[in-house]
Image (spheres, rainbow, N blue to C red):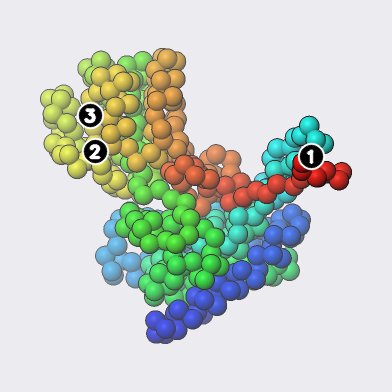
Amino acid sequence: MLKLHEKSRDDTVALMADIGRRARAAARPLAVATAERKHAALIGMAQAILRHEQDILDANAIDIKNGEQSGLSASFMDRLKLDPARIRAMADGISEIAGLRDPVGDVIAAWDRPNGLHIERVRTPLGVVGVIYESRPNVTADAGALCLKAGNPVILRGGSDSLNSSAAIHACLVEGLNAAKLPQDAIQLVPTADRAAVGEMLKGLSSNIDVIIPRGGKNLVERVQNEARVPVFAHLEGICHLYIDRSADLDMAVRIAVNAKMRRTGVCGAAETLLVDRAVAATHLTPILEALRAAGCEIHADGEVLKVFADARPATDADWVSEYLDAIIAVKLVDGVAGAIEHIENFSSHHTEAIVAEDADAVERFFNEIDSAILLHNASTQFADGGEFGMGAEIGIATGKMHARGPVGVEQLTSFKYRVRGTGQVRP
């Protein structure tokens, strides 16, 4: 088990500097590690998590008790809580990552020049990754496994609310590294709740961190984006929209709306705003809202919706820009797909948007005109997840346009270099 560090701020600065140096030292041996050795380490990690299930549950029980005493919100508690099914899902996720094609060394593109030079663009590890996250102890497993698969050392700084759970999971990852004779420093967990540790990571640990990935609430992500001196892969908010077109199948619309909002309300892919085509307000609106209400959802509605469905709260301007992460949804009538696109462009966080429609033209317009990282047709927004994309898992969702966008999986954790082969050419 990780030994927790509880000393002064100066000690924390020294601790983080040492972690950064050790991560950088692990980068080279990890970058050249064979696919077979990384695979063995990942399988060993998955097996260790299953073998130590009770240890992880015991550690999580401490975090749950502390969270209850400190008054964490229901959505935070949901993300924090582990049970046997979630632990098995963690192990399965690592096994899936192990089964993915190793991206390191892949030739992305190759071409020949008229002068006879042969040029290849080849995937390489990105470097040392820093991951800062809140509540979700499963991120410890997902991030550690994904970074290892891509040949990157990773420094994990979990939230103080999940430190015991993360430490128990990290111990399993170290078992896998040791079994495969890979450096233990390839996956390090920051052993302190001192907030100064985050500040040191954002400074880059003397250029020993190459990229930062935050996973948590708006305040955390804002701080990282504002203060980081290294590149950041992140999304600030998940204000996700579900649009019900006039051509939508009603039963499908009801099923998708309930799942998109209520399957897990605390995830970033949960729908926060429901837009319904005004043309089907009389037929589609009430059945969808009744189903949401029956599932325990609180509805905040604009004036037009309130006239049709009185059992709702009046929506305010704040509702259209709120990531509730709770059993609440904002509902508005719009003028067809054009109205939906206009609303989404005005209020979206460019994370995930979905359309329920049978009209192919409406779908194509939705896909072509909305600039969000993930767009879905006739499917729940809750599929905005690297595991559901076949990536094994994800570290998070990125909404920026540089390097990584959408789920950040194994391939997104690589960079590339050019290999140029000649036969004695010189440039005139």
Q: Is residue 111 visible?
A: yes
- As drawn, 232 above or below 275: below
Q: Is residue 183 left or right of residue 394?
A: right
* Three-letter residue code for mark 3: Lys
Mark 3 neighbour class, 10 Å CA radius: few under 14, some 14 to 19, many 20 or more: many
Alpha carbon of mark 3 to alpha carbon of mark 2: how far? Answer: 9 Å
| Mark 2 or 1: the one toward you | 1
**Tag 1 residue:** 118
Image quadrant in which the C terminus is located:
top right
* Three-letter residue code for mark 2: Trp
Identify the residue shown where x is 48% and y is 55%. 231
Q: Position of residue 162 (x, y in %)?
A: 42, 66
CB of mark 3 within 8 Å of CB of mark 2? Answer: yes
Question: Going from the N terminus, do you reach mark 3 or mark 2 first?
Answer: 2
* Three-letter residue code for mark 1: His
Image mark for residue 332: 3
Mark 2 neighbour class, 10 Å CA radius: few under 14, some 14 to 19, many 20 or more: many
